Amino acid sequence: MHSIARNIRQLSVVHGRQLSTTRTLARDAIKNGLVVGMFASHKLFNSEQIPQAVQDKILQEAQAQGNKADAGSVQLVLSPDLTQHIAVVGLGNESTNMSEIVRTAVANGVKQLKAKKISNINIAPMPCAHASGEAAALASYSFTAFKTQKAEEQLPTISSTDAEEWNTGRVYAEAQNFARELMATPANFMTPTIFARRVQDELASLPNTKVNVYDEQWARDQRMGGLIAVSQGSDEPLRFVEIVYQGRPGPVSLAMVGKGITFDTGGYSLKLGKNMDLMKGDMGGGATVVAAMRAIAQLRLPINVVATVPLCENMVSGRATKVSDVYTSRAGLTVEVMNTDAEGRIVLADALHYTVEAHQPQSIVDVATLTGAMVVALGELYTGVFTPSPSLWQHIDRAGTATDEPVWRMPLHDRWDAMLKSSIADLSNIGCKGEAGACTAAAFLRQFVDGPRLTPPAIMREQNNDESIPRWAHLDIAGPMEASTFEGYHHQGMSGRPTRLLIELAKQLSAE
């Protein structure tokens, strides 16, 4: 009797293991996934589109596991018919603006389903379809181009029934991923020549879009003494990229100028070795501007936009510009180079002057990983914005709010102009007091947009109410260029920000 009982127990254990193994294998074989949003009240968003049996299973599991549906949380549930992994993402309490919550929650859901090797993911309707589309693409990003032993990872096919708004959000996010890729690529694989070629490959065939790539001789013909001065220390030839998108008849509404230093050693004002690897992303302004232009053309926005990117390396050699050297800019102003690591403003100045003269835009925005001072001031969260135009600031601020790309308005003042004095040239490329570094960099750039400001007024004031055309803004993205976290839709490393903000800015200006 005892042996029979023992055999029965052993058989039960074996059958239990077999059942458990069968269930595990069945779950591992599931290739379909669903992302569903749930509020803290345990109400499913757009529940009428979810089968009742699935709703019942989700709510039953949520109650059993004490799921409070906190914003960004994820609970995985197996569908009643065992054909789907369902990521129930927390939306927290219902509110009027849920874009960032949706972006984070959907991204977390997609990441968990990716970890399950799900090949087909459907995202149920969300309170903000645009943010849901962005999350789908941003969460799918990875950069493994230089890994020889790659993990077996097949990117899932992601879809949604939210349709147009969801797809628009995805275009925004795929543009940011493109900028991420450009910035993350090592400098020996992203020289000025290669960058320019990538731009041609990605944008030249898009509707209403023309891409021009210019060489050093063109830069010399254009009197771009600053771009030539920075580039001459490198063996890699400079390039100047110009993208023209015409979405409607009429003048250029927006011009964007992106800093394109594909690697920055600091020149003779040599950077410290620590974190110099990040300088492969010193062309982040150029990358985000180019990526934004790709999305603008793909979306066929009814606006005329121009983008320019001066591309070169800032290196040390016998030909490199030295501290105290003087060059003549395209604007005709002479500049004394008091710090060769303040090279971004030098190449941007020539590009700004060219873009204003050649295209006469109504608004012009330059984007640059420009100053360490901005990192100290605002960290990696905020983009610092300098503009004398209240109306352009309002557009940028609204674009930042719409895309959850935080921006902060920084001061422009006559005092910053006075600090750019040089004893032997028209300007110095850095402030003479060693303070307000981000502010004096912005003041330097403004000299090349609406004319030189070499003689300070008797009474110095803040420059915060100037609507003269072109309206100008400088975006210092030295902080946001890098993400330090994998949380939500972020990916540690080069961030690709603020690409989505730039696309949204163009969209808003197209309605003017």
Image (cartoon, helix red, strand yellow):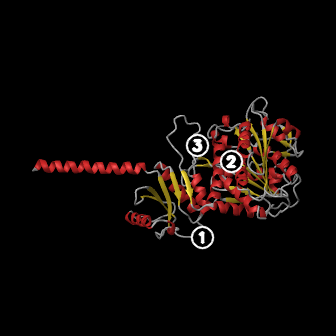
Image quarter of residue 56: bottom left
In the rendering, at what x and y percent does residue 22 appear?
34, 49
Amino acid type, residue under disc 1 in the picture: Thr
Q: Measure how far apart labels 3 and 1 are at the Cα level.
A: 35 Å
Q: Measure how far apart labels 3 and 2 are at the Cα level.
A: 26 Å
Q: Residue furthest left?
A: 1
Residue that mark 3 sits on = 143
Q: Few, some or many C-alpha atoms within 10 Å of disc 1 (few <14, some 14-19, many ≥20)?
A: few
Amino acid type, residue under disc 3 in the picture: Phe
Tell me what residue is drawn at x 82 percent, y 41 percent. 226
User: Taking the image as drawn, is residue 498 in sight?
Assistant: no
| Relative vertical location of residue 49 with respect to residue 241 in this rendering, above or below | below
Instruction: Report the disc number at residue 372.
Output: 2
In the rendering, at what x and y percent does residue 162 appear?
59, 62
Q: Is residue 103 left or right of residue 469?
A: left
Amino acid type, residue under disc 2 in the picture: Gly
Q: Earlier in the sequence, mark 3 or mark 2?
A: 3
Tell me what residue is drawn at x 73 percent, y 34 percent. 315
Q: Earlier in the sequence, mark 3 or mark 1?
A: 1
Tell me what residue is drawn at x 47 percent, y 71 percent. 41
Say what secondary structure mark 2 lies in.
helix
Q: Few, some or many C-alpha atoms within 10 Å of disc 2 (few <14, some 14-19, many ≥20)?
A: some
Q: Quadrant of the C terminus?
A: bottom right
Residue that mark 1 sits on = 96
In the rendering, at what x and y percent does residue 437 appear?
73, 50
Q: Are marks 3 and 2 in contact (CB under 8 Å)?
A: no
Instruction: Report the disc number at residue 271.
Output: none
Q: Nearer the viewer, residue 376 or 49?
A: 49
Q: Nearer the viewer, residue 379 or 391?
A: 391
Q: Few, some or many C-alpha atoms within 10 Å of disc 3 (few <14, some 14-19, many ≥20)?
A: few
Say what secondary structure mark 1 lies in.
loop
Q: Earlier in the sequence, mark 1 or mark 2?
A: 1
